[in-house]
Image: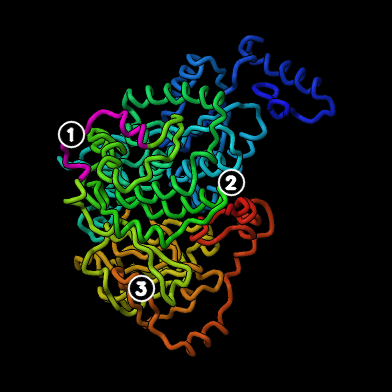
Amino acid sequence: MAEKPIGMKRGLAHYGDAGFSLFLRKAFIKAMGYSDSALERPIIGITNTFSGYNACHRSVPDMIEAIKRGVMLAGGLPIEFPIVSMHEAFSHPTSMFLRNLMAMDAEEMIRAQPMDAVVLIGGCDKTVPALLMGAASADVPAILTVTGPMITASHKGERLGACTDCRRFWGQHRAGVIDASEIEEIGDKLAPGPGTCMVMGTASTMALVAEALGMMLPGGAAIPAVHADRLRHAESTGERAVALASERLLPSQIMTRRSMTNALRVLQAVGGSTNGVIHLAAIAGRLGFDLDLAELDRLGVETPVLVDLKPSGQHYMEDLFKAGGLTAILREIELLIDKECLTVTGRSLGENLAAQPQGWPNDIVRPMSNPIHNGGGIRVLRGNLAPNGAIIKQAAASPALLKHSGRAVVFTSLEDMAARIDSADLDVKADDVLVLQNAGPKGAPGMPEAGYIPIPRKLASCGVKDMVRISDARMSGTAFGAIVLHVSPEAAVGGPLALVRDGDNIELDVERGVLALLVDDELLRQRRAEWNPPAHVAARRGYARLYFEQVLQAEDGCDFNFLRAKPKF
């Protein structure tokens, strides 16, 4: 069998003459100043995810230089290329709406351009899953690195950082505790430099689970963005990419069902973002299997939350870095993980773990005997209100609300919620259940992080800090509260959530995994007969049309149906 083409000979443009295609390619690339000697080396692509709109990726240019240095030290030719980059606060309508676009961009550019391996530079929440989804589909040797978390700042002697503290202080501002001048002052301090949110939000979660999956060199998830170790890790990543090209070690050999179980285990142990469930489901779909929500629940029972980071705990990512990063976590759950899983190092997860420096006592990663929370960070809920499932981040919820029945106060859309949530005549009490409809994958669209429904002003001003809140939306990993998310099927496609009305009784029992609408079946049938879908779910053109036609529900990762791999048995 003929050897696969490498370097400049990979994926030639179709001109009907392969020799001419290669001649033309080399002629044009030489305009960049490359010599024949350089062009004979293994080519390592580098995804340039820098953007002037993306502060999480401000340090990407420096990282690229370090990656290039590593590639060249190992005898390769580094070539960076631009790719979609998105920041949570600069993506309309939501970054989730655009995640699949970035994944498609990654897949097609990796496939279209000649590269023997690719270095993926992630960071902000959706960039890591998008890059891993694209890499899984392209299945070219790939290795991930991330920009790393921001360092913390201080306000009046109190340590603070994005974005758990963003929400905490904004809640105090809404309640009238903090005035307009002080909230502006706090806003100047919450993001003191480049990097991702420095709590256990989605970016930190996805970095840790990606390292647990085996797609990142050991230690890379927790290094702060401004630390010199971040550049040294980037250099090592570039160097290892050249070896991956030679070894032909593929993402499909690393990201498997078994390594996905390790990732889910780590998700529970770190008290990770609920968004991690959606993203891992999307990655699994690209690999040809479904994410098992029942397994997520089982792993949660076995795996307590061990990492004392906000929003479930008190500390920040730079503290986890100082405590040993993911290595410290894996050592605590070593008897629970599959150490035989292959990683980008070419060695197993267990071999990587054994090669790391010995740990030391610390207050950040708790021992199994003294966890932050027993029973896992995330719990799957089911019932007649969520036939396909919903989830709650129980480790960040008020314990008194984990078993609760209350009267529904319903908002039919984001616009309805914005118009009425702070109204003085809103009929709402502290023991009610706030329900938001039509905020799911198709309903909003883009499944915004609107599940963190604000406490109505009339209650917040009286000191109410948490209520049971239910929606088909998502929630930032930096947020907290007794918040039920990802209700599926969503309201916009006719899920039972669409049938909830003001005054209905709703039961939440997290220990039993139950989410129930306590309404007579006949009444629900009458409501269903009267239901109509939102008008906006049928876009006429462009990416929005593709999105509405193809996006799946939360349990399938909100990926596009046509991008999922055929099931592997």
Residue at screen point 25% across, 69% down: 401
Please report the bounds of the magenta region as a residue range. Answer: 350-366
The alpha-carbon separation of the residues under discs 2 and 1 comes to 43 Å
**Measured along the vertical axis of the image, is residue 9 above or below residue 159?**
above
Residue at screen point 46% across, 34% down: 144
The alpha-carbon separation of the residues under discs 2 and 3 comes to 35 Å
Q: Amino acid at mark 1?
A: Trp
Residue 514 disc label: 3
**Element under disc 3:** strand
Query: Is residue 342 shown to the viewer in this render?
Result: yes
Residue at screen point 31% across, 71% down: 512
Q: Which residue is mark 2?
A: 101
Give whichever of 7, 62 is nearer the camera.
Answer: 7
- Magenta span main SS: loop
Q: Which residue is mark 1?
A: 360
The quadrant of the rendering that contains the C terminus is bottom right
The outermost residue toward the bottom is: 522
Q: Is residue 363 magenta?
A: yes
Crowding at dot 1, Cα within 10 Å, few <14 / some 14-19 / many 20+, comes out as few
Q: Is residue 530 magenta?
A: no
Q: Amino acid at mark 3?
A: Val
